[in-house]
């Protein structure tokens, strides 16, 4: 199995697991107050972060500061940070409220929307 095939298999496995978890917790999530729902949305967003990134996840967008950090006159080595284009908590909310969510649907959404990222300069 190639590295690409292994990555795709791991992405699929995580998407499948996440759909199963979301379906199981949706009834509980819908009974919570907005405050508690926010926690579950954040946790779902974190799960999205831990799905392996597809090889084509980068949108090609990078902040000007990030580009400038690679300039030879910069005394510090670049410290880039990945940022999802679509906010993860918002993705979590959409997924938790999607009663028609399936593995195939999440896999497509992750590859085309929720898994896309761009680069910024890390502030750490």
Image (cartoon, rainbow, N blue to C red):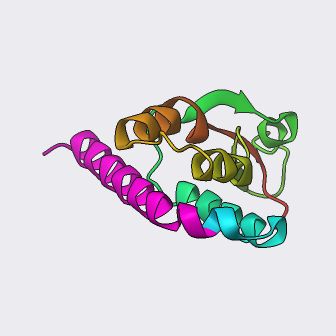
Q: Which secondary structure dominates the residues rendered in magenta?
A: helix
Residue 78 shows in the view = no
User: Which residue is farthest left?
Assistant: 1
Q: Position of residue 104 (x, y in %)?
A: 36, 36
Residue 38 colored magenta? no
Q: Quadrant of residue 58?
A: top right
Residue 25 colored magenta? yes
In this rendering, the count of numbered labels is: 0
- Left or right of 65? Residue 90 is left
Q: Position of residue 46 (x, y in %)?
A: 61, 63
Q: Quadrant of the N terminus?
A: top left
Q: Nearer the viewer, residue 46 or 18?
A: 18
- Left or right of 88? Residue 54 is left
Tell me which segment is drawn in magenta.
Answer: 1-28
Q: Quadrant of the C terminus?
A: bottom right
Q: Position of residue 15 (x, y in %)?
A: 40, 50
Q: Residue at x 24, y 49 (%)?
A: 6
Q: Is residue 44 above or below residue 99?
A: below
Q: Quadrant of residue 21?
A: bottom left
Q: Residue at x 71, y 29 (%)?
A: 61
Q: Nearer the viewer, residue 53 or 80?
A: 53
Q: Residue at x 44, y 32 (%)?
A: 108
Q: Position of residue 8 (x, y in %)?
A: 30, 43
Q: Nearer the viewer, residue 43 or 22?
A: 22
Residue 49 shows in the view = yes
Q: Is residue 3 above or below residue 64?
A: below
- Left or right of 110? Residue 28 is right
Q: Is residue 93 above or below residue 63?
A: below
């Amino acid at each position: 199995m190639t590295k690409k095939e292994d990555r795709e298999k791991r992405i699929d496995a995580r998407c499948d697991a996440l759909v199963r978890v979301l379906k199981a917790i949706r009834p509980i999530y819908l009974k919570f107050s907005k405050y508690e729902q926010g926690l579950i949305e954040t946790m779902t967003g974190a799960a999205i972060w831990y799905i392996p990134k597809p090889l084509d996840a980068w949108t090609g967008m990078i902040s000007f500061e990030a580009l400038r950090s690679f300039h030879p006159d910069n005394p510090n080595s670049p410290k880039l940070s990945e940022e999802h284009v679509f906010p993860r908590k918002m993705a979590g909310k959409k997924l938790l409220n999607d009663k028609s969510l399936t593995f195939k649907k999440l896999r497509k959404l992750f590859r085309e929307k929720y898994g896309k990222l761009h680069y910024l300069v890390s502030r750490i």
